[in-house]
Image (cartoon, helix red, strand yellow):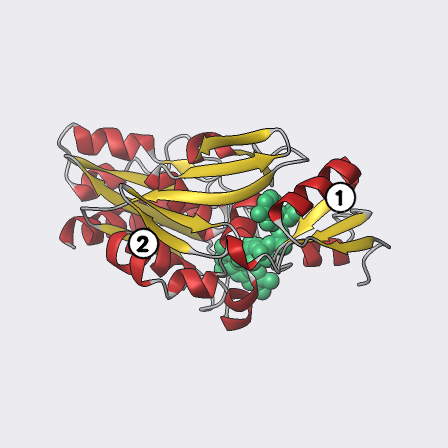
């Protein structure tokens, strides 16, 4: 398939990208790794008349130890997230999950910011960010704001990003407890049919689900059961509460609900055992 006609400009800096966004407004789309946007354009599900290429803004590709938290530049490619020593040491669930995305080519091109901004409920990193209570730093020409992961994902392929905003950085906490990301897929390089992120916290765990609704979901029934003293296997039975998983050729909604319970049990057992 061939995309609809569009103009193209290369942003030379973050400020330049913001200027171009102001200039072109709703008509424009940022292009990072292109591994979600370009397939949509080829199917003509997205028809921006202007592409602003931010893929060369190397100063937005980094992972830094910022004291209490880690800062990840939005243009950090999945491969660099996976290989980050700082993440491996302090928040290894992020590095591990980036290594579970697609295949080598996807990980060479795709960026963490693109994955989050795309707002696909089948993506892996949004779920991990939700379990971690990560903070997204958004910049526009009128200033900067920070949005928690629980408010960032607003609907199917929709986020809190405004049309003239750039996601610049993701801030994740340093972990002191165990973690797990369980991804169930047909082939190694496929999207998750269901995924579960679990991060151990004081007396319980934060648990979030991939592909169980229109946005990544917190499994609050599981979290409450753990806080009330249930063991992992008992708490995991609550995993499908308040979910609305899709049915597709890879699995029915009921199959996904079952998977969510099984994967949550495995995730909790792994997180608690680490
Ligand atoms: C074959 C294949 C398999 C894949 N498998 C998986 C998988 O298993 N798991 C998974 O999670 N993902 C998977 N992906 C998606 C992959 O991770 C994408 O790279 C990622 O979702 C999008 O990142 P990108 O940098 O390519 O973004 P792009 O495609 O360039 O952009 C995506 C969207 O985000 C916007 N955007 C990008 N960067 C910013 C920013 N900094 N600020 C504001 N808006 C921005 C763009 O305007 C666009 O709307 C797969 C993709 C392919 C093609």
Point out which mark residue 266 bears.
none
Q: Earlier in the sequence, mark 2 or mark 1?
A: 1
The residue tagged with tag 2: helix, strand or loop? helix
Q: How many marks?
A: 2
Where residue 174 appears, x then y in whole percent?
Answer: 26, 46
The residue tagged with tag 1: helix, strand or loop? strand
**Mark 2–mark 1 CB contact (< 8 Å):** no
Where residue 162 appears, x then y in whole percent?
Answer: 63, 32
Which part of the image, by quadrant, shows the N terminus?
bottom right
Relative side of 112 to 49, left or right = left
Q: Nearer the viewer, residue 140 or 41?
A: 140
Which part of the image, by quadrant, shows the C terminus?
bottom left
**Figure quadrant, ligand 1:** bottom right
User: Against 96, is 195 above or below?
Assistant: above
At x 28% / y 38%, what residue is drawn? Answer: 206
Q: Nearer the viewer, residue 171 or 23?
A: 23
Query: Does residue 193 show up?
Result: yes
Q: Is mark 2 within 8 Å of ligand 1?
A: no
Mark nearer the viewer, 2 or 1: 1
At x 68% / y 35%, what residue is drawn? Answer: 163
Relative side of 228 to 156, left or right = left
Q: Give the labeled residue for mark 2.
A: 93
Residue lying at the far bottom of the rendered structure: 104
Give the Cα separation between the discs numbered 2 and 1.
Answer: 33 Å
User: Against 1, is 201 above or below?
Assistant: above
At x 35% / y 44%, what residue is drawn? Answer: 172
Query: Does residue 111 show up?
Result: no
Classed neighbour count for the residue bearing mark 1: other residues with Cα under 10 Å, few (<14), some (14–19), many (≥20) = many
Picture quarter containing residue 261?
top left
Where residue 190 appears, x then y in whole percent?
Answer: 50, 63
Q: Give the labeled residue for mark 1.
A: 28
């Amino acid at each position: 398939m061939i995309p609809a006609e569009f103009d193209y400009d290369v942003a030379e800096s973050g400020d330049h990208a913001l200027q171009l966004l102001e200039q072109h407004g709703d008509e424009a789309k940022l292009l990072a790794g292109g591994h979600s946007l370009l397939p949509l354009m080829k199917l003509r599900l997205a028809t921006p008349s202007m592409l602003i290429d931010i893929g060369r803004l190397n100063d937005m590709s980094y992972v830094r130890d910022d004291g209490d938290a880690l800062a990840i530049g939005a243009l950090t490619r999945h491969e660099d997230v996976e290989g980050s020593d700082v993440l491996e040491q302090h928040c290894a669930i992020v590095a591990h999950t980036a290594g579970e995305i697609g295949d080598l080519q996807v990980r060479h091109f795709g960026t963490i910011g693109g994955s989050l901004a795309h707002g696909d409920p089948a993506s892996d990193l949004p779920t991990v960010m939700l379990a971690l209570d990560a903070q997204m730093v958004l910049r526009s020409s009128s200033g900067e704001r920070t949005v928690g992961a629980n408010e960032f994902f607003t609907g199917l392929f929709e986020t809190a990003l405004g049309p003239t905003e750039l996601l610049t950085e993701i801030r994740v906490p340093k972990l002191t407890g165990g973690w797990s990301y369980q991804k169930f897929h047909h082939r190694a390089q496929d999207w998750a049919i269901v995924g579960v992120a679990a991060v151990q916290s004081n007396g319980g765990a934060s648990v979030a689900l991939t592909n169980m609704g229109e946005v990544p979901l917190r499994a609050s029934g599981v979290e409450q059961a753990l806080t009330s003293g249930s063991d992992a296997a008992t708490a995991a039975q609550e995993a499908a509460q308040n979910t609305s998983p899709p049915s597709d050729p890879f699995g029915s909604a009921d199959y996904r609900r079952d998977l969510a319970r099984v994967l949550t049990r495995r995730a909790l057992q792994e997180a608690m055992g680490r």
